[in-house]
Image: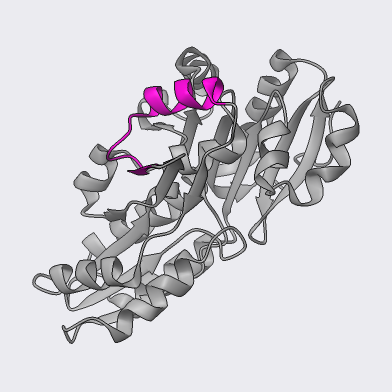
Amino acid sequence: MTVKIVTDSTSDLTSKMADDLGITVVPLYIQFGEETYRDGVDLTTEDFYRRLVESKTLPTTSTTSPATFAEVYDKLAQEADEILVLPLSTKYSKTYEVAIQARDLKKSKARVEVIDSTFAIMGLGLLCIAAAKAAREGANLDEVISVTQRNMKRVDVRMAFDTLEYLKRGGRIGNAQAFMGSVLKINPILTIKEGITEPIARTRSRAKAIDHLYNFALGFSNIEEMAIEDATTPDEVEALAERLNAKFPKERIYRSKVSPVVGTHVGPHVLAVAVLGDKDASAKTGRRT
């Protein structure tokens, strides 16, 4: 049996990553005023972040339709018997519900299972990559699901911001609200825990924020996959990958861009690291200043 993986554009998988592993990425939507764009299809990340900075009002985001997912299922059913769908966290979007509804609309007999990934950005991306690799090695759908559920406990992300203003304006700030009192004075570090955005640390400069991302990656005793992504600062990605080379080969570190749908809520200067691996039990945890 052939298993295919489906995700949405908030996974931040590049076209090459998706194509190499046969992953189907369903675009979500961004709307500037009356203009609607498919995430990662109709609007480049460069154009999006330029418009985001220039716009006086925050763009809106939305999921796709059940019919779109159903069409994807039927197309994949021509070459696959089983399909696993990994959308972003249900606490961020209704995409999971839409993917479930689409099962009743599909015409094919392919088995489709949908899992709440509890992640977004390359945390979700790494789950999809690992699932696709397992499928490529011959795992059936139940085995791929088992691998994914184990990996959901082994994935962690850290995001460095220069402001929480975009999260605040987009209503996605979650428990990071506690940081808002000093939003203009700090470079906060956030993670995704149990499907929602959570504060981890407050740093006093961009350099210290990047140091935090570096130390976070060093806290793993075993790394299976790693990704670094940015919105508008690719030089920071390459510099961090170079620093991490002694821990994990920089050639194996995925580089990606934070998609416009996510970028609407995190802003143009986010820098993130995602790791799939096992944490060092002796690594220090907690908040850094």
Of residues 158 and 139, the one drawn nearer to the viewer in this rendering? 158
At x 43%, y 44%, the residue is: 30
On the question of residue 224 being in view, the answer is no
Furthest-left residue in view?
78
> Residue 152, located in which quarter of the rendered image?
bottom right
Q: Is residue 106 left or right of residue 78?
A: right
Of residues 42 and 155, the one drawn nearer to the viewer in this rendering? 42
When the figure is inspected, residue 130 is found, relative to residue 201, above or below; the finding is below
Q: Position of residue 275 (x, y in %)?
A: 54, 43
> Quick one: quadrant of the C terminus?
top right
Q: Is residue 229 left or right of residue 25?
A: right
Q: Position of residue 213 (x, y in %)?
A: 65, 29
Residue 36: in magenta span: yes
Of residues 217 and 180, the one drawn nearer to the viewer in this rendering? 180
Magenta region, residue range = 35-55
Of residues 11 and 157, the one drawn nearer to the viewer in this rendering? 11
Q: Position of residue 36 (x, y in %)?
A: 37, 44
When the figure is inspected, residue 211 is found, relative to residue 192, above or below; the finding is above
On the question of residue 289 being in view, the answer is yes
